[in-house]
C-alpha cells in the first residue's frame, strides 16, 4: 500500500507524493477530503451518543424505522465511520495514484449526500424504509465508485483491496436496512459491517503504524525498530479474515471462537513487533499502538464470548469503541496536523482527546462485563466519548475550516 504513510505525515503538495493540484479558490473546508468528513464525522459521533442515552432509557423517541438499538449501531457503524474512512481515502488516493484530489463541487455533493443519509435514517418511519435505504446507501456506493475510478486511472491496482472492503461495508449497510425491515433487527448485517471495519483497521493500521513509528524512532530514539510489513503480516490479516467470516456466520460456535482466539493472539504478536513501547515520548504515535491493541482485544473477547465467558457485546465494543474509536481519532488528529502544515506532535488538547477516548472504550467494555456497575459505567463511557469527538471538533475545527493554527491550551 505504497503512499499510505504519507497521508498523515505530509502537507499538501509536499515531498510525500501528493500532487500539486490546480489552483482552488473555494472554501477551505472543501479543499481536501479530510476537512469536511473528519469534522462532520466527529460532530455526528458525539451528537449521536448524546441522543443515544435518553433513547436507551426511553426518555426520547425518534421517527426512525429502526429499533433504538439498531439506530444507535447504524449511526456509529454506517454514519460516523464511513465519513472518517472517506476523509482518509480521499486524502490517501492522490498519494497512491499521483492524480488530483477530489475537491470543490464533487466533494460538496458527497458531503450533502452523507448528511441526507443521516436525516433519512433518523426519519425513515416518515419517508419509508426503502427510500431511507436508497439515500443512505448511495453515499458508500459513490465513495467506492470514486475510489475505484481513481485507483484504476492511476493503475494502482494493489490498493483495490481497500475499495473491496468499502464495498463490503456498503453491502452490510444495505443488508442492515433489509434485515431490520424483514426481521425487526439487524444482527447479521451488524456483524458484516463490523468485520469490514476490523479488516480495514488491520490492513491500514498494519501499514501506517510501523511506518510512522520507524520514521520517528530513526530520528528521535535510535535503537530497536518496527518489523516492516512482510509475510507474517499477510498471514495474520488472512487468519483474521477467516476468523471474522466464521464469527459472522456463527458467533457462538466454539470452532469460530477458537479461530478468533488464534487471530487475537497473532494480532498481539504483530503489535509487539512494532516497538510501540519505545514511542511513549510522542503520544501522537503511542495512541496508534493503543488503538491496535483494542483490535486484538476484540478478537480475544469475542472468542471468550463463544465459550460463554463474557457477553457478546464486550468484544464488539472493544472493536468499535476501542479499535475504531481510538484509531479514527488517532488518524484524524495526525492527518489534520500533517496536511495543514502543523508540527506532528500531540498538544495538550490532543492528549486530552486521547485520554477521553481510552476512558470511553474501557468504561464501555467494563459496563458489559460488570453488569452490577453498568449504569454509571455507561454514563462515563458516553460522556467520555462525547468529550473526545466534540473535543476534536472544537480543537481542530478552526484548522479544518482554514481559519488558522490549532488552538493550544495550557
Image (tube, grey):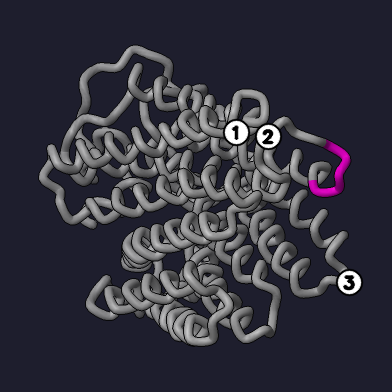
SS label for mark 1: helix
Q: For the residues marked 3 and 2, what is the alpha-carbon distance in whole angstroms?
A: 31 Å
Percent x, y of residue 312 = 65, 71
Q: Is residue 357 left or right of residue 62?
A: left
Percent x, y of residue 148 = 23, 41
Image vertical order of residue 214 relative to residue 91, above or below: below
Label 3 neighbour load within 10 Å: few <14, some 14-19, many 20+: few
Q: For the residues marked 1 and 3, what is the alpha-carbon distance in whole angstroms?
A: 33 Å
Give the residue at x 40% y 40%: 86
**Rendered-image quadrant of the N terminus:** bottom left
Residue 177 inside the magenta-drawn segment = no
Residue 340 can be seen, yes or no: no
Q: Decide which of 25, 79 is in the foreground and name it.
A: 79
Residue 58 inside the magenta-drawn segment = yes
Front disc: 1 or 3: 1
In the rendered image, which residue does mark 1 sit on?
121
* Numbered mark located on residue 372 in the image: 3
* Numbered mark located on residue 404 in the image: none
Label 1 neighbour load within 10 Å: few <14, some 14-19, many 20+: many
Percent x, y of residue 191 = 52, 61
Q: Decide which of 387, 297 is in the foreground and name it.
A: 297
Kindly indicate whether the residue at mark 1 contacts the one at mark 2 (C-beta within 8 angstroms).
yes
Q: For the residues marked 2 and 1, what is the alpha-carbon distance in whole angstroms?
A: 6 Å
Front disc: 3 or 2: 2
**Rendered-image quadrant of the C terminus:** top right
**Occupied quadrant, residue 267:** bottom left
SS label for mark 2: loop
**Occupied quadrant, residue 374:** bottom right
Q: Which residues are magenta?
A: 56-60
**Occupied quadrant, residue 380:** bottom right
Amino acid at each position: 500500500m505504497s503512499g499510505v504513510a504519507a497521508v498523515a505525515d505530509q502537507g499538501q503538495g509536499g515531498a510525500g507524493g501528493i500532487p500539486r493540484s490546480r489552483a482552488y479558490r473555494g472554501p477551505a473546508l472543501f479543499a481536501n477530503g479530510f476537512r469536511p468528513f473528519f469534522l462532520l464525522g466527529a460532530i455526528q459521533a458525539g451528537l449521536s451518543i448524546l441522543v443515544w442515552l435518553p433513547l436507551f432509557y426511553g426518555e426520547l423517541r425518534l421517527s426512525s424505522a429502526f429499533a433504538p438499538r439498531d439506530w444507535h449501531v447504524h449511526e456509529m457503524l454506517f454514519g460516523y465511520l464511513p465519513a472518517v474512512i472517506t476523509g482518509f481515502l480521499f486524502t490517501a488516493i492522490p498519494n497512491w495514484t499521483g492524480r488530483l484530489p477530489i475537491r470543490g463541487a464533487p466533494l460538496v455533493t458527497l458531503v450533502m449526500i452523507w448528511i441526507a443519509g443521516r436525516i433519512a435514517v433518523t426519519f425513515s418511519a416518515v419517508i419509508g424504509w426503502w427510500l431511507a435505504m436508497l439515500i443512505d446507501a448511495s453515499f458508500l456506493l459513490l465513495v467506492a465508485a470514486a475510489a475505484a475510478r481513481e485507483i484504476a486511472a492511476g493503475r494502482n491496482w494493489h490498493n483495490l483491496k481497500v475499495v473491496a472492503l468499502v464495498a463490503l461495508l456498503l453491502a452490510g449497510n444495505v443488508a442492515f436496512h433489509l434485515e431490520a425491515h424483514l426481521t425487526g433487527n439487524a444482527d447479521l448485517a451488524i456483524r458484516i459491517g463490523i468485520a469490514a471495519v476490523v479488516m480495514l483497521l488491520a490492513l491500514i493500521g498494519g501499514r501506517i503504524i510501523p511506518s510512522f513509528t520507524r520514521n520517528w524512532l530513526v530520528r528521535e530514539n535510535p535503537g530497536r525498530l518496527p518489523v516492516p510489513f512482510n509475510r507474517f503480516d499477510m498471514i495474520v490479516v488472512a487468519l483474521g479474515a477467516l476468523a471474522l467470516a466464521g464469527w459472522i456466520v456463527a458467533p457462538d460456535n466454539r470452532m469460530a471462537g477458537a479461530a478468533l482466539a488464534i487471530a487475537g493472539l497473532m494480532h498481539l504478536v504483530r503489535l509487539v513487533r512494532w516497538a510501540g513501547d519505545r514511542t511513549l515520548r510522542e503520544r501522537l504515535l503511542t495512541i496508534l499502538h493503543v488503538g491496535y491493541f483494542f483490535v486484538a482485544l476484540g478478537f480475544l473477547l469475542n472468542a471468550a464470548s463463544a465459550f460463554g465467558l463474557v457477553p457478546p457485546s464486550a468484544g464488539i465494543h472493544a472493536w468499535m469503541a476501542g479499535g475504531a474509536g481510538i484509531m479514527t481519532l488517532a488518524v484524524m488528529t495526525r492527518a489534520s496536523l500533517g496536511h495543514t502544515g502543523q508540527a506532528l506532535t500531540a498538544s495538550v488538547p490532543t492528549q486530552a482527546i486521547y485520554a477521553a477516548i481510552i476512558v470511553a472504550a474501557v468504561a464501555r467494555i467494563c459496563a458489559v462485563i460488570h453488569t452490577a456497575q453498568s449504569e454509571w459505567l455507561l454514563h462515563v463511557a458516553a460522556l467520555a466519548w462525547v468529550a473526545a469527538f466534540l473535543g476534536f471538533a472544537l480543537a481542530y475545527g478552526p484548522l479544518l475550516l482554514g481559519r488558522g493554527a490549532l488552538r493550544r491550551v495550557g
